[in-house]
Image (cartoon, coloured by chain):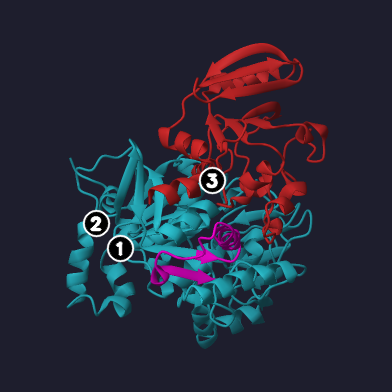
Chain colours: A red, B cyan
């Protein structure tokens, strides 16, 4: 079953946010996904960001820059996002393992060109920014304070789309192999 | 048109191409540790799929937090232990026989040229030193690997890194690895495989090649590979002498994996190391690399020697050579974690541990421990560590701590001086 992709956007204006920042290693001894929930982005080094703040609490989408999710292979990073209701991360680029982990969980790691990412960041000062992703149409409808602001188109690899539609790699692989 | 080593390995392990550009590969080895595997095991149980595709191809180790430090880490070890027993996984390594996965598994001869290898650990690229396609993956990929023996990858592009020249004194494979990451940058190899070659790599031991390949992921690389050659055959000979009539026959067989001279590369990078200096990192990204000579006065609180990058016997020899007859500076703590029991024993027999203990170092058991801030040497806020590990991320070795990556020789030199120090400047 496909997850919903859309909602309020949390803007993280930095490149190279690594998986240690998304979920520190000391929490990797947890054996359930739900136990990770309080610790999302706890060690993020970003001026003005509060891991306990409203912006994160009310977000269903993250928009960020280059090389998001670099470093450790820990799938705890997507899980920590998922248990906080964030199924969609939009970035200029992802680290390979993190991106694969997202799709393997039936979540969405959406890559957009730098100009589109810049346009989204430009909206961030104008109010509460939200978006809604339409997978079949390949469009991302962006709104500011609920009013339509912009519609972006995107590309997704067919395999990644198949994983999202299947609800993840285990479902897909168990049917196909 | 010629093929790269990775294209040859992909073709030899082809299972499916569900969509153009996506390849599903048959796996030769699926490696598991206690941090990323238990959730996969639990999920397989929940789905009623608690089985493995081939117990002989699964290798498992408790290495990240061992001996267990608390109830949670003990529970993770227990889940892995009971699963290995239930699934008849003979190659399971527990207390007394366990060590850092990327040092232990090569030592056991599990990795061979041309193999496909995955593990729920990003430094799985280390095993590319044997001419294998070895990739770090998440728990879901691991779960499917355990269950079905397959993993999906995008069609690989390859960056060829030619490394030539003789390494100057006190400059090591770690410095070369850092230089490669500096030049490629932290995402310069994303969705790429790094192929290392050139006279410097040809002259490297398997341990040095593992150090080099280990840090491919710090440039974003899916894997990092060296061509399997006589050095590879020498290392593997105790494990493969039943498969080949002679070492020469093994070497000739390995050559089938070599990239063709007319293979196509996404990019070619040439590095001359004959004037390379001892290097370290500043900041929180592994590509922020500088000559130690130029970093200014950076006092340290701790030296850490170990990890899948630099916890092997040659690293401990290198550390002991610098440490011999010296002491850690007042106020500096030193920690050495030999990466496997075999390395520990060898270092003991060679007198290396005694030299390091005389210099003031604490010797811990083999474990990933402090490298990722789990145990055995976690930093306090604002503390600084000269470390032979692979990541200097914010909080990596403990919240608020700072890690500077370097070779074992540089780390020991820094411990003697109490600040980041070029090992060439130590006069004994």
Whether labels 2 and 1 belong to a single chain: the reply is: yes
How many circles with numbers are drawn on the protein? 3
Residue at 61% over, 33% down: A88
Residue at 65% over, 57% down: B420
Labels 2 & 1 near each other (Cβ < 8 A):
yes
Find disc 2 in the rendering and name its residue.
B257
Foreground: B403 or B157? B157
The quarter holding residue B299 reads: bottom right
Judge left or right: residue B313 versus residue B194.
Answer: right
Residue at 49% over, 43% down: A96
Chain letter behind tag 1 = B
Quadrant of the image containing the N terminus of chain A: top right
Label annotation for residue A74? none
Label annotation for residue A101? 3
Q: Position of residue B222 (x, y in %)?
A: 43, 48
Chain letter behind tag 2 = B
Residue at 67% over, 60% down: A31
Up/down of A111 relative to B242, above or below: above
Badge 2 marks a residue whose secondary structure is helix
Up/down of A170 relative to A52, above or below: below
Q: State whether residue A134 appears in this view.
A: yes
* Label 1 – label 3 distance at C-alpha: 27 Å
Q: Determine crowd level at label 2: few under 14, some 14-19, many 20+ residues with C-alpha closer than 10 A.
A: many
State the extent of the magenta-drawn residues as a range.
Answer: B32-61
Foreground: B105 or B24? B24
Chain letter behind tag 3 = A
Find disc 1 in the rendering and name its residue.
B113
* Label 2 – label 1 distance at C-alpha: 8 Å
């Amino acid at each position: 079953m496909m997850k919903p992709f859309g909602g309020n956007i949390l803007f993280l204006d930095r490149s190279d946010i690594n998986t240690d920042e998304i979920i520190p290693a000391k929490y990797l001894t947890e054996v359930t996904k739900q136990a990770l929930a309080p610790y999302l982005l706890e060690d993020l080094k970003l001026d003005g960001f509060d891991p306990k703040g409203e912006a994160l609490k009310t977000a269903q989408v993250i928009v960020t820059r280059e090389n998001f999710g670099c470093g450790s292979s820990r799938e705890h990073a997507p899980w920590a996002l998922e248990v906080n209701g964030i199924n969609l991360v939009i970035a200029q680029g992802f680290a390979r393992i993190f991106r694969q982990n997202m799709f393997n969980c039936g979540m969405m790691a959406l890559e957009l060109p730098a100009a589109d990412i810049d346009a989204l960041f430009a909206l961030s000062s104008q109010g509460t920014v939200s978006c809604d992703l339409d997978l079949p149409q390949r469009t991302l409808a962006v709104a500011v304070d609920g009013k339509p602001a912009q519609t972006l188109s995107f590309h997704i690899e067919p395999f990644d789309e198949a994983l999202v539609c299947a609800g993840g790699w285990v479902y897909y692989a168990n049917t196909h192999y | 048109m010629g093929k790269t080593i990775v294209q040859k390995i992909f073709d030899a392990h082809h299972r499916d191409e569900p969509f153009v550009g996506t390849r599903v590969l048959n796996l030769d080895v699926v490696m598991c540790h206690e941090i990323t595997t238990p959730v996969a095991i639990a999920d397989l149980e929940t789905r009623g799929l608690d089985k493995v595709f081939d117990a002989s191809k699964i290798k498992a180790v408790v290495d990240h937090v061992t001996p267990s430090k608390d109830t949670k880490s003990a529970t993770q070890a227990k889940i892995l232990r009971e699963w290995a027993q239930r699934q008849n996984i003979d190659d399971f390594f527990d207390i007394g026989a366990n060590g850092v996965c990327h040092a232990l598994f090569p030592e056991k001869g599990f990795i061979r040229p041309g193999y496909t290898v995955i593990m729920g650990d990003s430094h799985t690229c280390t095993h590319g030193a044997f001419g294998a396609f070895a990739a770090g993956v998440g728990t879901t990929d691991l779960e499917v690997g355990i269950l079905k023996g397959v993993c999906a990858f995008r069609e690989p592009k390859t960056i060829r890194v030619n490394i030539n020249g003789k390494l100057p004194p006190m400059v090591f494979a770690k410095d070369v690895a850092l230089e490669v990451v500096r030049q490629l940058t932290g995402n310069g190899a994303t969705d790429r495989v790094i192929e290392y070659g050139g006279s410097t790599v040809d002259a490297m031991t398997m341990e040095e090649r593992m150090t080099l390949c280990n840090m491919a992921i710090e440039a974003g690389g899916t894997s990092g590979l060296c061509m399997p050659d006589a050095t590879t055959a020498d290392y593997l000979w105790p494990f493969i002498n039943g498969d080949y009539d002679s070492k020469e026959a093994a070497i000739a067989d390995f050559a089938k994996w070599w990239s063709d001279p007319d293979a196509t590369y996404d990019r070619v990078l040439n590095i001359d190391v004959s004037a390379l200096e001892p290097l370290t990192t500043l900041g929180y990204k592994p590509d922020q690399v500088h000559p130690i000579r130029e970093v200014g006065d950076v006092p340290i609180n701790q030296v850490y020697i170990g990890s899948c990058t630099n916890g092997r016997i040659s690293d401990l020899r290198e550390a002991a050579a610098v440490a011999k007859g010296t002491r850690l500076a007042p106020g500096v703590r030193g920690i050495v974690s030999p990466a496997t029991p075999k390395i520990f024993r060898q270092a003991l027999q060679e007198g290396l541990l005694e030299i390091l203990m005389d210099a003031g170092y604490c010797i811990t058991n083999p474990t990933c421990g402090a490298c990722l801030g789990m145990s055995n040497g976690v930093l306090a806020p604002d503390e600084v560590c000269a470390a032979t590990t692979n990541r200097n991320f914010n909080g990596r070795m403990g919240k608020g701590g700072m890690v500077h990556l370097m070779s074992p020789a540089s780390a020991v030199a820094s411990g003697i001086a109490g600040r980041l120090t070029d090992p060439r400047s130590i006069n004994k």
